């Protein structure tokens, strides 16, 4: 349906928001299928935890940090997998050395539903669909940096997602 750049556009859904502050003690650890504190709510995250990331989000503190796709590439990724398809999602991001941030919404069989490109180094990104069909989200950035060791990542914070529409919609 459409890419979104402000969180208010998720207002038509009953949303869940994860600030990641509960993950601060896991600073530097990788999340995935084996280690995932949000599996109980049907969300698997493939990313690292970064305490003190201080994004321009509501919670500001702890965030998710991208992981390099392949060791010798300049692309990094965060992947989100939902047990139940969602109608929309959004998050704050910071990607200071990225040429662009590409967000792909896929269904549960990993068929691409929609792709959105965000070009600012910091902001809000998300996608809303007409029906709840988003089973997976891939967020990929190509990092252009003079210091690939320190600057080869991006961060997301305050992830919001929703499946059911509010009664007024």
Image (cartoon, helix red, strand yellow):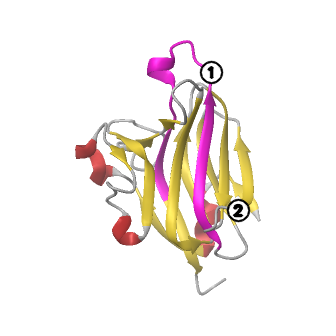
Mark nearer the N terminus (1 vs 2): 2
Left or right? Give the position of 128 relative to 90.
right
Q: Is residue 93 above or below residue 110?
A: above
Whether residue 151 appears in magenta in the rendering, the answer is yes
Residue at position x 70%, y 36% in the image: 119
Q: Residue furthest right?
A: 1
Residue, far top: 146
The image quadrant that residue 17 belongs to is bottom left
Q: Is residue 67 left or right of residue 134?
A: left
Q: Residue at x 72, y 44 (%)?
A: 117
Comparing marks 1 and 2, which lies closer to the viewer? 2
Which quadrant holds residue 162?
A: bottom right
Q: Range of the magenta residues?
A: 133-159
Dot 1 falls on a residue whose secondary structure is loop
Residue placed under numbered mark 2 in the picture: 111
Could you say which is closer to the camera, residue 144 or residue 110?
A: 110
Q: Few, some or many C-alpha atoms within 10 Å of disc 1 (few <14, some 14-19, many ≥20)?
A: some
The correct choice, above or below, for 77 with respect to 41 in the image is above
Q: Residues within 10 Å of mark 2 (few under 14, many from 20)?
A: few
Q: Residues under labels 1 and 2: Cα distance?
A: 28 Å
Q: Position of residue 104 (x, y in %)?
A: 67, 52
The reply to whether dot 1 and dot 2 touch (C-beta < 8 Å) is no
- Residue on which disc 1 sits: 144
In this view, the residue in front, 150 or 74, is: 74
């Amino acid at each position: 349906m459409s890419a979104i750049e402000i969180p208010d556009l998720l207002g038509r859904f009953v949303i869940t928001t994860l600030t990641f502050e509960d993950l601060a003690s896991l600073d530097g650890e990788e999340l995935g299928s084996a280690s995932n504190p949000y599996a109980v709510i049907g969300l698997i995250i493939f990313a690292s935890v970064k305490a003190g990331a201080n994004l321009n989000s509501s919670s500001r503190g702890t965030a998710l940090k991208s992981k390099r796709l392949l060791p010798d590439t300049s692309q990094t990724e965060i992947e989100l997998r939902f047990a139940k398809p969602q109608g929309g999602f959004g998050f704050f991001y910071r990607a200071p050395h990225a040429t662009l941030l590409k967000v792909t919404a896929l269904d549960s069989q990993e068929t691409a539903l929609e792709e959105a490109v965000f070009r600012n180094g910091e902001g809000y990104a998300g996608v809303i669909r007409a029906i709840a069909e988003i089973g997976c989200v891939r967020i990929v950035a190509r990092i252009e940096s003079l210091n690939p060791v320190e600057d080869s990542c991006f961060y997301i914070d305050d992830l919001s997602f929703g499946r059911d529409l509010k009664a007024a919609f």
